[in-house]
Amino acid sequence: MDEQNLVWLAGGTVDESRLMLRFFGDDLDPDFVSQRLGSPPTDSCRKGDLHRKGRILEKTGRWLLEKERTAEPLEDCLMQLFGSLTKDLAVWKELTQRFHGDLRCHLIARRWNREQTLRSQVLAAIADRGLELIIDMYFEPQDAGGAEQTASAAGGRDSGSS
């Protein structure tokens, strides 16, 4: 590739995201959390349960609701997640006072210098539920062919010139 004509595409929002709502606690009963939130978990255990591989005991209880990786806007995914669960903030307060609760967001960028904005209403929805927000950033670059195609499509290379 001719470095003189190379165009680096930067900016824009993250390309994909994945959300996980998580609760942890030594006395966590997954059925209780499910009943209070109005949804079953995608993964759960009680303290002392055998680990999924059956060789070690779980050190604490957990309740996880994981959403699939998607290219949909993160804010939409967050609000859909909250919309699928109880709207009663007293229930959320009860759970986050009794257990550690957090919202883990995996943000995946295909190109460098991506960003993610969360409007104040979305941040308030997280805070109103007493959740800690954890953001994990991942960089999964496009393959060399995809990067060249992107640069070419943006006018970064003129295939007709020498």
Image: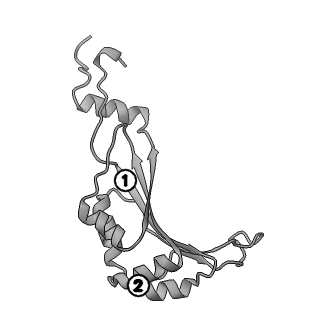
Q: Residues within 10 Å of mark 2 (few under 14, many from 20)?
A: some
Q: Is residue 25 left or right of residue 40?
A: right
Q: Residues within 10 Å of mark 1 (few under 14, many from 20)?
A: some
Q: Is residue 116 left or right of residue 135?
A: left
> Which residue is at 41% across, 79% downward?
92
Q: Tag 2, which secondary structure?
A: helix
Residue 67 to residue 95: above or below: above
Q: Tag 1, which secondary structure?
A: strand
State which quadrant residue 91 falls in: bottom left
- Toward the viewer: 75 or 125? 125
Residue 81 to residue 29: above or below: above
CB atoms of marks 2 and 1 within 8 Å: no
State which quadrant residue 27 falls in: bottom right
Instruction: Measuring from the top left, give residue 112's x and y in whole percent.
Output: 37, 37
- In the picture of the structure, the residue carrying the numbered disc 1 is 16
Instruction: Measuring from the top left, give residue 39's x and y in whole percent.
Output: 43, 83
> Which residue is at 31% across, 33% downward?
149
State which quadrant residue 134 falls in: bottom left
Residue 41 to residue 147: above or below: below
Q: Amino acid at mark 2?
A: Val
Q: Amino acid at mark 1?
A: Glu
> Which residue is at 70% across, 78% downward?
49
- Toward the viewer: 57 or 152? 57
Instruction: Measuring from the top left, give residue 62's x and y in whole percent.
Output: 58, 74
- In the picture of the structure, the residue carrying the numbered disc 2 is 91
